[in-house]
Amino acid sequence: MRISSRLVLAAVLPFMVGPQAMAQASPVSIPTTPAEDPVLRELIREAMEKSPQLAAAIRAAEAEEERIPQAGSLADPLLSLGYQNDGFKRFEIGRMETTWGTIMASQAFPYPGKRKLREDVISANAEAARASVDRIRLTLESDLRRAYVGLLLVRGQQALQKEQELIWKQAEAVAKARYEAGQGSQLDLLRAQLERMKAAQQALRLESEARAKVIELDRLAGRPLDAPIETRALLEGMLPPTVPPREAAIKQAEDRSPELHSSRHHIMHAASRVELAKLELRPDFALSAGIMPRGALDPMWQVGFSVSIPLWSRTKQRRAIAENEALQKSEESNLDDQRRRLAQATEQRLAALEASTRILRLYAPVLVQSKAAFESALAQFETGRASFSSVLEVLNGYIQDRAAFLKEQADAQGLVIALDEANPITAPGIGNSMQVSGRVASAAPSM
């Protein structure tokens, strides 16, 4: 009995077509970019509606908005009641001219312009709260996109793992048949059995990772944690992302950054605080009016005008002016620091994305050569110049090359997400690794 290499080819080649060929043969539309993925869009929509963190931030912003008219409103008027009596023996109201009751009302009025400036100062807190809402919304969407790409990565790795496991099963069957026919060695059989068991172990690890990603997505989207997520998108079938021009990317990051938006408003409100501190050198006023009934005698009336005197301005109001001028300069420096940090992060992400897209473009010939190497090893096996174990080793390398391509696709998408997030702080990576036949394709951090 002779086991032909064509039997090996027939057993192995069906698993070499990969997700790209399967996607081409599928009648279902497969998204080629994350933006086209309806599953991801639905998850983002649900998250924006159900996120308790986002809801809490929105309510906090609404609460800050309610403080603005409070800051600009007048102080509450005062109403006072009193009675003056001439002597201690009896009530003399109506009998003595120096005995009367008092009904007095007074209202304080700040110097013109103070109320508007106080509203401007308090509105800084509202702007900060709105910026916090924007940051939470951007981060929530980005976390969802990262977790979804991570799920696609794990599921793509699972598909490769299944191909590899099936290949090793076929290899074990062929090696066993060759060994029983006296055409192969026991080493080939043992190697095939060992690799099949390793593949089964890795499949269990990937299953756990996929489950963890689904749970993370369910939590972010506000779904029950056991809700399944069906995906059609394939990382292997996605187009490499486009690297935006440097100036456009930095401008987009500055336009989207809630931190820069908040800092700009803080500078404006710091200027308002300086103007308000200067106006505190101006006096406030109060008007009062009252009536004093005297029983049978004619009533009396009274009006009054009072003014505050900034007598201690040297240690109070003028120090407040200096304080707020220093705070204004601090806010300007903070804005410059935030802009520089964001520009640095954007530049680094662009450089990493450009390198990643160039690597992805190089993968096309790499995968072709990897497959050609397997076919060459198979031809050598037919002529007896290569062992069956070496043929499967080369095939395993082809699987690893595809796994590395998957990881590079995920890292590139992670960099695109980080650019859209416009966070001056380095964003987390996709965070996944796949071990195939003892070799690891690990996750490079996405900035």
Image: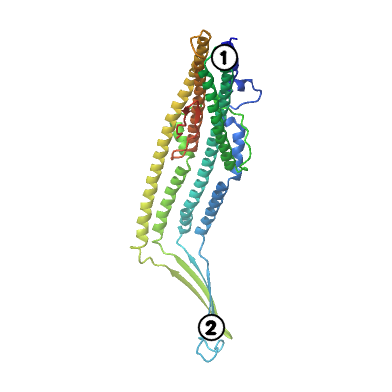
How many angstroms separate mark 1 from mark 2 (CA)? 124 Å
Q: Residue furthest left?
A: 314
| Vertical relation: 398 (above or below) 441 | above
Residue assigned mark 1: 178
Specify the quadrant that holds the N terminus: top right
Q: Residue furthest bottom?
A: 89
Vertical placement of 52 versus 308: above or below? above
Residue at position x 59%, y 40% in the image: 218
Q: Residue furthest right?
A: 27
Q: In this orientation, does residue 173 appear? A: yes
Q: Which residue type carries mark 1?
A: Arg
Q: Is residue 350 left or right of residue 378?
A: left
Element carrying mark 2: strand
* Snapshot colouring: rainbow
Q: Position of residue 304 (x, y in %)?
A: 48, 73
Amino acid at dot 2: Trp
Residue at screen point 53% across, 51% down: 61
Say which element carries label 1.
Answer: helix
Disc 2 target residue: 100
Callout 1: few (<14), some (14-19), or many (20+) C-alpha neighbours within 10 Å? many
Q: Nearer the viewer, mark 1 or mark 2?
A: 1
Earlier sequence position, callout 1 versus callout 2: 2
Q: Residue 126's spot in the image, x, y percent?
A: 50, 51
| The quadrant where residue 47 appears | top right
Asked whether 222 or 95 is in front, the reply is: 222
The answer to which of 233 and 384 lies nearer the viewer is 384
